[in-house]
Amino acid sequence: MTWLLYLTTVLIWGTTWIAIAWQLGEVAVPVSVFYRFALAASLLLTVLALTGRLKRISGRDHGFCMLQGLCVFCLNFYLFYTATGYISSGLCSVVFSMAILFNAINGVIFFRQPIRPRLLLANALGIVGMVSLFWRDLSAEQLNWDVLFGVGCALLGTYGFSLGNMLSARHQKRGLDLLSTNAYAMSYGAWAMLMIAWLSGAEFSLDTSWQYLGSLFYLAVFGSVVAFGTYFALVGRIGAGQAAYATVLFPLVALTISTWFEGYQWSPSALLGLLLILLGNAVMFWQPKQKSAALAMSSGKA
């Protein structure tokens, strides 16, 4: 089950890049993000309510859901969309891969989870692999204040995403329903994006082309309801540090699709990055046979 959650998260979020690209243009970015999470929250709340699975939570828990919505479903996206106006998508991907490091550190701060040597090695391989994967973009980037501002926005967005991971882990440790807390958090995130769009003077227009509406539906249903559900389920199952390694694999899916449809050419440094990322993934999840057998014997005796 865990591998299926992991694979689903990677494949869906790895394909959302093209849907996000189709969102850019006629509609202002804050408005598009608001549409995405307003639609996602409405669908999820409706389905949960109709099936009797929407769980009530305390006012205090709603407060934490509000924080999760601000961190993940509002500021994370707003800051990353802003960052793409100043730095390349490759540099954005490299910065976002820092989520694996932020999650490990935040796990120590908030839950006193030890950082194991295997996690450190996997994180190092993943981050070095990301740098190698996008080396052409990084080497072409001219260091200036605009780039520093873009990197700063991306780092803040990544840290917000990491804090959202901690909040989801907090919900699950308290035994709160994952889908219900996601629905509430998305609702709060959508309201926050609405306020940002309104305060920034964005025009609330709607692109009625099939490309925009189709990508909006994909991002809301699959990129938000399904993928965030599977990802946060992973956070609860294997921990935020390991779950975040999925963020390193998203660009591999995106570049594979780009290879098929856009003629992306793999350079030697990109191939090296691919190998390092896959090696880091193997280090993260590989279980020695002796250990697995010992665990099976101990569980059988229990």
Image (cartoon, rainbow, N blue to C red):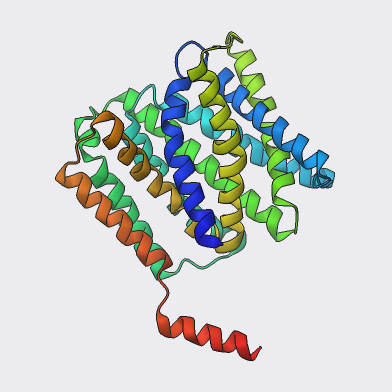
Q: Position of residue 266 (x, y in %)?
A: 20, 41
Image-quadrant location for residue 42: top right
Q: Residue at x 48, y 59 (%)?
A: 242
Q: Residue at x 71, y 39 (%)?
A: 183
Image-based side of 46 in relation to 249, left or right: right
Q: Where is residue 164 in the image (x, y as percent from the top left)?
A: 60, 45
Q: Is residue 271 above or below residue 137?
A: below
Residue 196 vs residue 295, the one in the foreground: 295
Q: Position of residue 69 (x, y in %)?
A: 65, 37
Quadrant containing the C terminus is bottom right
Residue 36 vs residue 58, the one in the foreground: 36
Q: Position of residue 270 (x, y in %)?
A: 22, 45
Number of dots carrying numbers:
0
Quadrant containing the N terminus is bottom right
Whether residue 241 is visible to the viewer of this picture, yes or no, is no
Image-based side of 219 in relation to 92, left or right: right
Residue farthest toward the bottom in the current orientation of the protein: 301
Residue farthest toward the left in the current orientation of the protein: 268
Whether residue 297 is visible to the viewer of this picture, yes or no, is yes
Q: In this view, does 162 lie above or below 173?
A: above
Q: In this view, does 101 lie above or below 54?
A: below
Image-based side of 39 in relation to 82, left or right: right
Residue 101 vs residue 249, the one in the foreground: 249
Image-based side of 88 in relation to 83, left or right: left
